Image (cartoon, grey):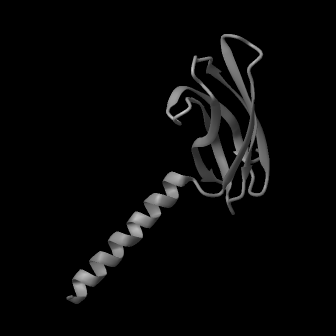
Amino acid sequence: MSWPRVVGVGVGVALLMLADVASAQDGFRVTHTADRSNPGQTRINGTVFNDNRLDAVDVYVTAEALDASGKTVARGIAFVSPSIASGRSASFSATVPTMPGATSYRARVSSFRFGAGLQSP
C-alpha cells in the first residue's frame, strides 16, 4: 500500500470513529420514569447527568414510546436546561402521547452544544 493511501485510510477510520461518538452522545446519562396516570398522555420525568469535561448548553431530550419490538410509536421533545455544568445534572419532564401497543419508554439527549454556560453580567 502506498503512503498516501495509508494516510487516507487512517483519516477515514478516524472520521468514522468521531461520527460514531457524536451520534452516541457519550458523556450523558439519562434516567427516567413514566407516569401513565393520564389516559391521553404519558409524562416522562427524569434527570440528565453531564459526565463530560465541558458544560453543556441548550440541552434537549427526546422521549419515545416503544412497542414490543422496540419500534418508536410516539415521541415528545422537551427543553432540559440552558446550561448543565460538567459533573452536574438537571431534571426534565417530557410529554408523549399515549399509544396503544406502547410497552416501554426511553429518553435520550437529542440536542446540545458545548460552551461556557451562563455567565453573570
Residue at 64%, 33% in the rendered image: 105
Choose top left, top right, bottom left or bottom right for residue 4: bottom left
For residue 47, side relative to residue 8 (left or right)? right
- 12 and 112: which one is in front? 12
Residue positioned 69% across, 39% down in the render? 82
Q: Is residue 60 above or below residue 22?
A: above
Q: In this view of the protein, which residue sits in the foreground, 41 or 28?
A: 41
**Closer to the camera in the image, 13 or 53:** 13
Picture layout, residue 64 above or below residue 111? above
Examine the image and state in which quarter residue 40 appears. top right
| Residue displayed at 74% across by 57% down | 86
Q: Residue furthest front?
A: 68
56 relative position to 71: left or right: right
Q: Nearer the viewer, residue 35 or 91?
A: 35
28 on left or right of 18: right
Location of residue 15 by image quarter: bottom left
The quarter of the picture where the N terminus appears is: bottom left
Residue 3 drawn at (x, y percent): 24, 89
Image x and y of residue 16, in percent? 39, 64
Where does the image place residue 17, in percent across and percent down from the top left? 45, 66
Residue 117, placed above or below residue 34: below
The quarter of the rendered structure image containing the C terminus is: top right
Farthest top residue in view: 39
The spot of residue 69 in percent (x, y) is 51, 35
Residue 79 appears anywhere in the view: yes
All told, the count of numbered labels is 0
Let me know if residue 120 appears in the view: no
